[in-house]
Amino acid sequence: MTRFLSAIAAICVISLPALAQDISTSDVYACAETSDDAARLACYDSAVGRLKAAEEAGEVTTISRTEVEKVKRESFGFSIPSLPSLALRKSGTPDKELEDITAPVRSVRMDGAGRLRVTLEDGQVWVQTDDRSMRAKDAKEAHIYQAMLGSYKMKLDGRVAFKVRREQ
């Protein structure tokens, strides 16, 4: 009998990842449609159990709007095509594209070609791409915004804008 129960337990454990791939919050919400109280409770127990197993197996995770916005901010300037699909597509509210950021500057230095290399406090590194002569050693704040054709511009402490690209 114990061998039989062990075999069933092993089959259940092996099948958990397969179950985990077929669960979403929609399955939990669908239970609300069930009119019979006992059936609705059984539906919730089943759906929540599968969702919990999927989360523990690393197949499912929940992210908040704040976390999505943080990722968008941290990835600003990089092309990450799948990032918009992460953002709250089920809510029915169109997700707002991040068009600019303002951040404190950690350091500004000139590279060998005479172009600025700006490191922000959060570790982002932006490099000047135009030939404009800039001096900004003492800069405290950078404002970076999208320009035409997918390019970016930066203003240091509200001064003249220059073209940049994100390096890191």
Image (cartoon, rainbow, N blue to C red):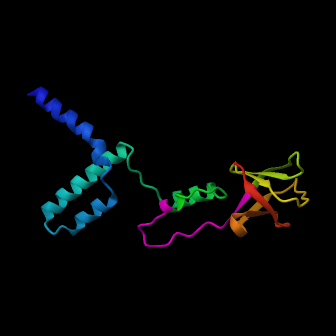
Where residue 92 sits, quadrant-wise, is bottom left
Front in this rendered view, residue 28 or 4: 4
Q: Can residue 92 be found in the magenta stretch?
A: yes
Percent position of residue 56, x then y = 35, 43
Percent position of residue 54, x then y = 33, 47
Direction bottom: furthest residue: 93
Up the image or down, 41 lies above or below 55; here it is: below
Where the N terminus falls, by quadrant? top left
Q: Can residue 25 be found in the magenta stretch?
A: no
Which residues fall within the magenta stretch? 85-104
Judged left or right of residue 72, residue 57 is: left
Up the image or down, 18 lies above or below 160; here it is: above
Name the residue: 52% across, 69% down.
Answer: 95
Judged left or right of residue 38, residue 17 is: right
Name the residue: 41% across, 51% down.
Answer: 61
Percent position of residue 131, x then y = 88, 59
Name the residue: 18% across, 62% down.
Answer: 40
Where residue 32 sits, quadrant-wise, is bottom left
Give the number of marks.
0
